[in-house]
Amino acid sequence: MQPVTVAEIARVTGGQVIVGNGAAKITGVKTDSRQLTAGDLFVALPGERTDGHAFVSSALAGAAEAALVSQVAAYSCPAGKAIILVPDTGQALLTLGAWYRGLFSVRTVGITGSTGKTTVKDLTAHVLASQFLTLKNLGNLNTEVGLPLTLFNLESKHRLAVLELAMRGPGQIHELAQVAQPEVGVITNVGVAHIELLGSQENIAQAKGELLECLPENGLAVLNGDDPQVRSQAARARCPVVYFGLSEDVDFKASEIQTAGTAGLSFTVTGLCGEGRIQLPLVGQFNVLNALPAIAVGHYFGLSFAEMSAALSSVKPAAMRLNIIECPDKTLIIDDVYNANPVSMRGALRTLADLAQGRREVAILGDMMELGKFGPKAHEEIGKLAVQEGVDCLIAGGSLAQFIAQGAISAGLNPDRVLTCPDACAVAEVAGKQVLPGDAVLVKASRGMQFEQVVAALQQERRLGSSC
């Protein structure tokens, strides 16, 4: 982070230095007191479980140079350090992030969507980073907290920034876009993730479409042309719009898709970028639709087809996202526990079927969260789909596991091969007994289910294994 003074931070956030010296220099911003390093500003955020204000004194006694608070209390502040009081630390963090981003002439790409946005962000950043120094969100730092924390990593050397924008309600994408100031906006798709909060896919599309209204006239909107809900938002953009997809009426089209087992897939791209073949070392045919917007964005920033093709051929799968683990006993584990919704579940089950290649198929599936009243039916449909994709054994875990099981049994899977468990710990125990050497095993659930425990247990049971 480019150094800024405590006094500057107070001015920008509308705060007041109530303790200490406004001339102190800040070289980083953190919201987790456990991650503080010398020169950091500690932002005390209230939370559901803990309140950051409880850690202000210890943060200042440690590495923090200053603290940003919204509550007046008898904090202990060592000499030479400072405390800034603001009305709302969450809003102040956003304001500070927007101001800091404005210090740089970096060109930014904003990416949102119901599924695939993190992979699109990673692929887009990977393509652009082959030619430009590019910043991107680490992990899922894509919220009103994570986005400004990402932006504080900007330096004058950065040419581009690829920023994932999360959405949990109306107005949030607009708020994040005001901070990110994107020149290019990508909407991957509109599904049912967060439907519990917004009520319908139409409402989700409206919320995602807020991104388009924030793009400048000389920018670019990159939209999924195969998704009618995404297309319906195009008129909200003041800038040119391009479409990607598998259909004919798009500007970046993929065709002739071929899979190569755990080695990944290949496909032909035609459109504004010319025509050529892409080798993508990721499994899951849906990743074709994740690569296309990366190509569209790369083309906008002047990369040649050859440069983009070379970059995509060198990508590596992210942790817990269709990560292939080959165990010594020939068991193939597909680790896809980063998150789950109906669309990504369908893609993962299709990938299991593609990679099984004669192996027994085992699906270990957990709850898809934030579906509200749509949850039971959505989980039942996933159970049915698992059987249609050839699953031989199903282990379901979580509060909605019974609906996955009901769906699988109703679709014809032998009830003896359908097991339900209350949580990840129980799933791991059952899986250890049910999974046989040489099986192809998909493990997938929403992040909150903590199914990484299941993957770790399976690996340990099979004496670990290596990721492709």
Image (cartoon, grey):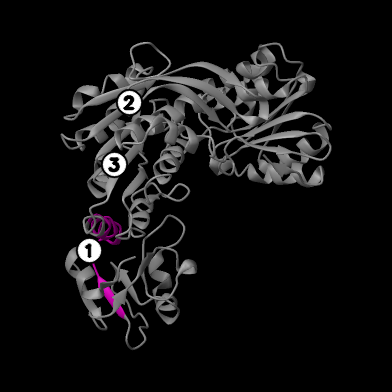
- Number of labels in the image equals 3
Residue, x 51% and y 28% (percent of image)?
287
Residue 400, x across and y down, in percent? 59, 30
Residue where numbered disc 2 is placed: 223
- Of tags 3 and 2, the one toward the viewer is 2
Residue where numbered disc 3 is placed: 172
Amino acid at the residue labelled 1? Pro
Left or right of residue 376, residue 214 in this image: left
Residue 331, x across and y down, in percent? 78, 34
Residue 42 seen from this side: no
- Nearest to the observer: residue 264 or residue 334: 264
Residue 287 lies, with reference to residue 389, above or below; the image says below
Residue, x 33% and y 82% (percent of image)?
81
Q: Is residue 71 magenta?
A: no
The N terminus: image quadrant: bottom left
Question: What distance separates the C-alpha of mark 1 from that of mark 2?
Answer: 38 Å
Left or right of residue 321, residue 127 in this image: left
Q: Is residue 89 magenta?
A: yes
Give the magenta part as a residue range: 82-98
Question: What distance separates the C-alpha of mark 3 from that of mark 2?
Answer: 19 Å
Residue where numbered disc 1 is placed: 87
Question: What distance separates the C-alpha of mark 1 from that of mark 3?
Answer: 20 Å
Q: Quadrant of residue 252?
A: top left
Q: Could you classify mark 1 by the number of other residues whose Cα lies within 10 Å: few (under 14), some (14-19), or many (20 or more)?
A: some
Residue 396 lies, with reference to residue 152, above or below; the image says above
Residue 176 lies, with reference to residue 334, above or below; the image says below
Residue, x 36% and y 67% (percent of image)?
28
The C terminus: image quadrant: top right
Residue 70: give its label.
none
- Nearest to the observer: residue 247 or residue 64: 247
